[in-house]
Amino acid sequence: MRRVPVSSISNLRPARLLLGCALFPVVSSCWAQAQANPGDTVQVIGTRAPTALNRMVADVVVIDRDRIRATSADSLEDLLRREGGIQLSRNGGPGQSASVMIRGSAASNTLVLIDGVRIGSATLGQTDLAAISLAQVERIEIMRGPGSSLYGADAIGGVVNIVTRRGDGAPYVSGNIAGGNHRSGEAYAAVSGSDERVDYALSLSGETSDGASAVLPGDLFGIHNPDDDGLSRYGLQLAGGFSWQKGQRIGLSYSASRLRSQFDSAEFPPPNFLPDASPDFRNRLTTQLTTLEYQGVLSPEWTNLLRASYQTDQLRSGANLVSTYDTTRRQLTAQTTWAPTAQHQVVAAVDLLTESIHSSDYQAPERDNTGLIVGYTGRFGAQKLQADLRWDHNSVYDNQTTGKLGWGMDVAPGWSVRAVAGTAFRAPTFNDLYFPNFGVTTLLPERSRSIEAGVNYQAEQTSLSATAYYNKVSDLIGFQPDPSQCPPGLDFGCAGNTSRALLQGLTMQGLQQWDRFQFTLALDWLNAKDRDTDQTLNRRAANQQTFAVDWNEGPWQLGGTVLRVSQRPDAGVLLPAYALLNLNARWRFERFWQIEARLQNAFDRDYQPARDYQDIGRQFWIGLRYDGRGL
């Protein structure tokens, strides 16, 4: 594999220079900027504005383009779960409904952004990552821990920001084509570039596979269908910008993804209303995002950002009877950053959000949210300080005030310690509030209070980090089976604030460069309990480990990754532990051309990603890649 800089794995040392960023940009297209001094590396997700990492205390990790291109992961969600503190929940193999859980929080407690803009379904309350192809992604930033003080609702576990490509430099063309078993194929093509005033980027991606049956025979609900559950996934990105002078840019971007996937389920036709699993069930999910933004430098101390976006998430799901769930979001952000000195920065912002839904099952009023944010980061010698405060006013649920306070200190050459305390919340979904015979309009948001402490070590060939966290979540939204606790007319139960949770654990990550070898390790221990029953929360593994070895010699790059997931409860059973081995190899036979091969689940291990669901099994890919800048 291509050798990855130590800094790209470290919690607090994301690396890789993104060219073409304007002076002091405050936009998602410039999320990280590497410089000669690692302490000067700049990131955005932890503060909403470019901030030198030697002043940061947030738990941030960056997956750059080289790591994405070199991975053996079969999907975006599979790539994410190889990072510390992240577990995967998926109803089958690639293309099936998938979500990630950060630090043991539910999928609905992970906020997903594309280029800094909220995406996902307002009815289901989460983002289906299966709809997003890895080929669409330029880089990924992850903030583990409470994020509501910066980004508002649904950031109890953390925030994932998916950054798409922007043009920089001379015209640049890249692409790949690959095929594999299960009649699988994928292709990607992109062109980008810029001059002094104009930048542009265009990319297209596609992937198809016949897949395998998503559900095992003899499942709990009798929905197994022996047919293959395949997928097709397509993506498009367009982005362009105009800079009429240095530090002044206006940009327009459009991204779209379309997922068509088969799944196993059942209908209950009359007259006997028994489950019938024979129909061909399909999900048809289309997501679109259009963003217009202005970035401007007023002076060396002041920078501004204005961004307007329009996002739709359209799901058609079913067989003979098809249900529709459509989300529309209109978002507006105005942000200013004041940096009076190189060591101090203040960010102030206003976020306006309007959400509306259309469903074949019910209608609901739209809801509006206004968020006011102020944040400070500063450095005082060896000491670091970060403080964020946000107030949200929503037209449907209660006003929410969230905050975060962090402290850090450099204690020795390469060594630093940090501590963070914060609050966060998750908003009730439209289904929670309005779904017929279930929704309750008086539901409270879920709330969390968390603390964490960490230590980091950074040297030329070594990177280590460890973080311990403790998070108490209250007013969890779930099914209330007692009709006496429901509003009149809901005689079979309803949505309710039914439980409390305790999420605590330890995450460790490390990287060691040795000659032409690179070793990476991620270890997680998690205790995720219902505080009322003391039972482990469903689909949470008590421990998970990832170990990878990469070797690079001239035109050859070889790598292997082992992922082990421990036992975890799900729907009344204890799913067994499993371990997967993934391999990849690359041979650069010419400066711009490379042959690639990857083998996922090399030992064809049978395992259940969720109860009664199965993965696709062993899968082999071989392909050809072209990179106009040289590999």
Image (spheres, helix red, strand yellow):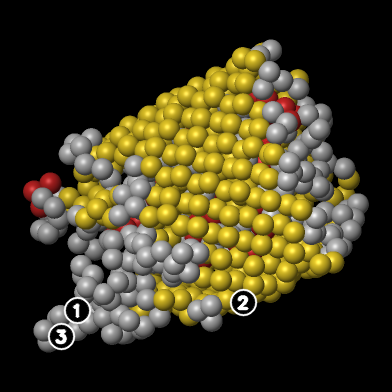
Which mark is nearer the camera, 3 or 2? 2
Residue at x-position 34% and y-position 62% = 608
Other-residue count near label 3 (Cα within 10 Å), few / some / many at <14 / 14–19 / ≥20: few
Comparing 131 with 550, the one in front is 550
Residue at x-position 50% and y-position 79% = 182
**What numbered label is drawn on residue 275?**
1
Q: Identity of the amino acid at label 2? A: Gly
According to the picture, the residue beneath numbered tag 2 turns out to be 179
**What numbered label is drawn on residue 270?**
3
182 left or right of 178 in image: left
**Position in image of residue 572 (x %, y %):** 19, 55
Q: Identity of the amino acid at label 3? A: Pro
Query: Where 479 falls versus 305 (above or below)?
Result: below
**Position in image of residue 524 (x %, y %):** 43, 39
Query: Where 574 falls versus 412 (above or below)?
Result: below
Which mark is nearer the camera, 1 or 2? 2
Marks 1/2: CA–CA distance: 37 Å
Other-residue count near label 1 (Cα within 10 Å), few / some / many at <14 / 14–19 / ≥20: some
| Among numbered discs 1 and 2, the one appearing first in the sequence | 2
Which residue is situated farthest in the right direction here?
196
Marks 1/3: CA–CA distance: 10 Å
396 left or right of 238 in image: left
Comparing 435 with 146, the one in front is 146
